[in-house]
Image: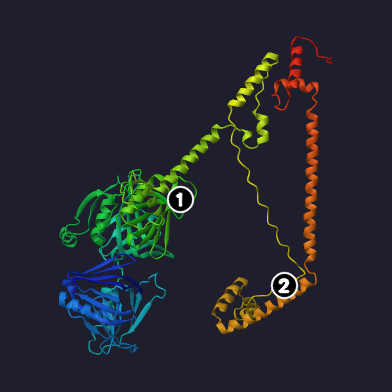
Amino acid sequence: MGDTLEFNEIYQEVKGSWNDGRLRFSKQNVVYKSSKTGKVDSIPASELNLAQWRRVCLGHGIKLGTSSGHVYKYDGFRDTDFEKISEFFKTNYKLELAEKDMCVKGWNWGTAKFSGPLLSFDVNDNTAFEVPLSNVSQCATGKNEVTLEFHQNDDTEVSLMEVRFYVPPSQSDERQDPVEAFAQSVLSKADVIQATGDAVCIFKELQCLTPRGRYDIRIYPTFLHLHGKTFDYKIPYTTVLRLFLLPHKDQRQMFFVISLDPPIKQGQTRYHFLILLFSKEEDISLTLNMSEEDVERRFEGKLSKNMSGSLYEMVSRVMKALVNRKITVPGNFQGHSGAQCITCSYKASSGLLYPLERGFIYVHKPPVHLRFEEISCVNFARGTTTTRSFDFEIETKQGNQYTFSSIEREEYGKLFDFVNAKKLNIKNRGFKERGSVKMNGPYSDSDEDQHDAYLERMKAEGKIREEGNDSDESDSFNPGEEDDDIAEEYDSNASASDSSEDGDDSEDDSAKKKKAKKPKPVKEKKERKPRKEKKQKDTGGPKRPMSAYMLWLNSSRERIKSENPGISITEISKKAGEMWRQLGKDEKEEWDTKAGEAKRDYDKAKKEYKESGGGSASVSKKESKKSGGKKDEKKRKSAGADKDKERSGNDSFKSREFIETSESSSDSDHKSKSKRKKVTALTACRSDGGTPAGEV
């Protein structure tokens, strides 16, 4: 037999809900780790003094007891596991795993026994049920009755609210009331918060982000009391899972985060995290309300009676000593700006994402803590609004997805390397691997040389975008890019000179410019596909047959209304769908037969309708519309051709006024050389002072 035994999918009952996890037996200790919260229970092997094997609702279970009075129960074992666990206990723990039968008679009278943190109700020396006293929130007494109320768990579908025990009067001992003795035994182990005595220390007016406001924090030996102007919260230290101390991105503030399970409640709101915000510059001198001997005995050097320093250091130090939990701080991750966090948005609220050594935590609205072991995969996605940012998506093994958006593009490389180093599964990893093979081979490990297709694509898109913005500002409007015919009209650069010599030179200059100027590429116009014509509905034809479901619905609609008075139309459809799915195969076959008969009748009627000439009228109308449309199109084309002829005929004759005004405009490329000479002669006569013929 090996040194360890490991079992998966082992369940532990926590306030009425079953949390699964992993259990490991080793020579030194017994370790159980919850899959939901990540909380670890470690039981030293030297403290074990009780081991029982029992038949429970989830197969078989083990009940372990320690010399300090704690009891641990783990369920979900198989019947075949008994032999190897029993042999392991005998060999390593020198402890016998005893089989214990449970009472299944269902009797409601028996004997109540208090054994450590459990209240056991036995019938004929066999346990009927056990109540963990740590789940008790309140204990009330009556004449011969004791009522136990329990803490509620939001994860359970059904919660046990209270249990009442009838305690008969005792004839032997009249000095002590048996009801009061029962209640005192319960309260001594119950998780009932009673603010008795003075607080160890008090922190005044601390800024709290979740729940929002300023609170006085009073530190008691067993619980934490938040006293605000509107609300008060009492938090037992047993509900604290983790402590985080996180530096703000501005390096002037600190977050102190307390993770809670179960959360504190305010109405329907649940607060799983308590977030305090401190300034680094704020100092405090603290004196504990205890003697030095008590401080030394209770905290074993972790705290002293008089302390001074930064406020956040004092709060975190006191909480660490009282809760007995380690404080988690950011690891060696550093972003683009040198901070240990990344600015991003989650659910439309801006916040900070901290990559830790064993998970991610987001502060602050709403706070999210994700451990690496519960992450299924991560994904780097392009931002929805701009290429200057990207999204970081995390998918858990339970199927939940968390999207942290609007992360700066510069943070991509640092975050990718961090995720890669932690060996998390990256959903779009294929892009990077395919690119890296081309550059440095499949085993390249350099961050600088390694090709990242996603990063290169983001850079290229940003560059194109910047160039596009520059070109829009610098380029002037040029109609020549849009149409070839217009391009010829705007390309000519005629001279505005009045002399004949300048006119000849301008023609040569314009010809040279035309040759030197490169023609700009013209975008090809794509031909549009003709639209599909809609089928016209034939109103005179037979109606389509109903499906089996619609036939059944028409016959059952009134029955559904009568069985559910006041039901709406949409709810009728939902109810009918559920009822149809629950129908048996034989019942559906009846309606399928009716639907088949209706289909055959429809096919027969349609055939007779077509043979009698039905539907031809609509076809003829459609064809007439088509022919009419073609005629109109021909008319438009002929009218356009006539206009072009008139335009070309007018171009052959130009009046004297046109010749005079043409000096300041560019000459047309379509004029012949003879016409150009005539225009030059006329302008030359005018420059000599003569009057052209016909001019007054």
Labels 1 and 2: the sequence-earlier one: 1
Q: Is residue 545 above or below residue 660?
A: below
Badge 2 element:
loop
Q: How crowded is mark 1: few (under 14 residues within 10 Å), some or many (20 or more)?
A: some
Q: Which numbered dot is residue 240? A: none
Whether residue 205 appears in this view of the structure is no
Q: Which residue is drawn at 39% across and 70% down?
A: 155
Quarter of the rendering containing residue 398: bottom left
Q: What element carries label 1?
A: strand
422 to the left or right of 89 = right
Residue 30 in sight: yes
The three-letter code of the residue at mark 2 reads Lys
* The one of 441 and 538 positioned closer to us in this rendering: 441
In the rendered image, residue 68, in percent from the top left (x then y), is placed at: 19, 72
- Tell me which corner region of the image, top left, top right, bottom left or bottom right, holds residue 422: bottom left
Is residue 103 positioned above or below 581 on the image? Answer: below
Image quadrant assignment for residue 296: bottom left
**What's under tag 1, amino acid-wise?**
Arg
Q: Mark 2 points at which residue?
A: 543
Mark 2 closeness class: few <14, some 14–19, many ≥20 residues within 10 Å = few
Name the quadrant of the N terminus. Answer: bottom left
Position of 538 with respect to 122 (left or right) is right
- Residue 134 pos. (x, y %): 29, 73
Give residue 185's position: percent from left, percent from top.
26, 78
Q: Nearer the viewer, residue 537 or 122?
A: 537
Image marks 1 and 2: residues in contact by CB distance under 8 Å? no
Q: In this view, does 190 lie to the left or right of 533?
A: left
Report the Cα–Cα distance between label 1 and label 2. 51 Å
Q: Which mark is residue 382?
A: 1
| Left or right for 573, reference 154 | right
Where's residue 306, x and y in %? 20, 53
- The residue mark sitting in front, 1 or 2, is 2
